[in-house]
Image: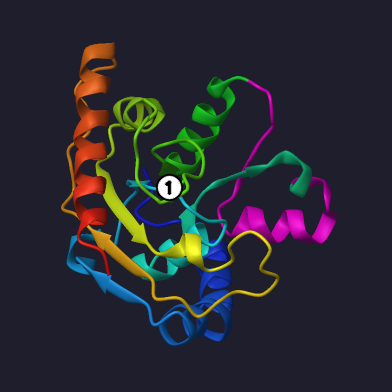
Amino acid sequence: MPRREPWPGLVLYHLLKWPVVAPFFWLYLRGRVEGFAHVPQRGPFLAVCNHASDFDPPLISCALGRPVAYMAKAELFQVPVLATLIRWYGAFPVRRGTSDRQAIQAALRALAQGWATGIFLPGTRTPDGRVTEPKLGAALIAAKAQVPLLPVMIWGTQHIRPPGCRWPRPTPVTVRIAPLLPPPPDTHRTTLEAVTWDCCRILNALHAQGR
């Protein structure tokens, strides 16, 4: 596998990070990152994250110091200029209502290109950011690609733009990163379930620390 993501993604990441995402995270949201030393600076890995807000993908990518490829709804890839930009930034299309197999294949392609790839363990946003019903997709992808898993917890983002709020609020946000976990040795369901619940316990333990 390539040791880094394709260079257009790396360039676009820094062009967006420093003038836009980093000031928003570090200054406006008073962002805090714990465990940055656990982030691999080279080679693909799977960031396994909780999810509470649409702001999570760019903030997590900023905190990790590397572009992170996330799935995005396929409709965005029909907009000519936007499609090119988000593809360079690592996004891969997933159609609503389609099988999980297509999303898994897209994530595997991103990892094969050297991307750090992000998967939200609950599969969708949760009201408080905790993970209660984790999906097996992250463990399955890690097993198929044989890449390590990096548990990444983001705290506080559900308060950035609550229902009825038009503008982002300057709420404190914390990102905590746990040590890498080895990829599952096989794709047996019992193995995937064990790894998935390990990730779930780690994320919820990090979340329980609060700010």
Residue at x 23% of width, y 30% of height: 197
Q: Taking 133 as reference, is 189 above or below it?
A: above
Q: Can residue 188 be seen by looking at this rendering?
A: no
Q: Is residue 135 left or right of residue 178?
A: right
Residue at x 59% of width, y 50% of height: 91
Is 91 in front, or is 153? 153
Q: Amino acid at mark 1?
A: Thr
How many marks the image carries: the answer is 1
Q: Position of residue 131 (x, y in %)?
A: 35, 40
Q: Taking 169 as reference, is 200 above or below it?
A: above
Q: Position of residue 107 (x, y in %)?
A: 49, 37
Q: Taking 96 as reference, is 70 above or below it?
A: below
Image: magenta residue range: 77-98
Is 207 in front, or is 4? 207
Label 1, residues with CA under 10 Å away: few <14, some 14-19, many ≥20: many
> What is the basis of the colouring in this image?
rainbow
Q: Position of residue 125 (x, y in %)?
A: 51, 45
Decide whether residue 117 is among the magenta residues: no
Quadrant where the N terminus is found in the figure: top left
Say which residue label 1 marks: 117
Q: Taking 114 as reference, is 162 above or below it?
A: below
Is 154 in front, or is 210? 210
Quadrant where the C terminus is found in the figure: bottom left
Residue at x 29% of width, y 16% of height: 187
Residue at x 54% of width, y 21% of height: 101
The kind of secondary structure element at disc 1 is: strand
Q: Can residue 86 be seen by looking at this rendering?
A: yes
Decide whether residue 86 is among the magenta residues: yes
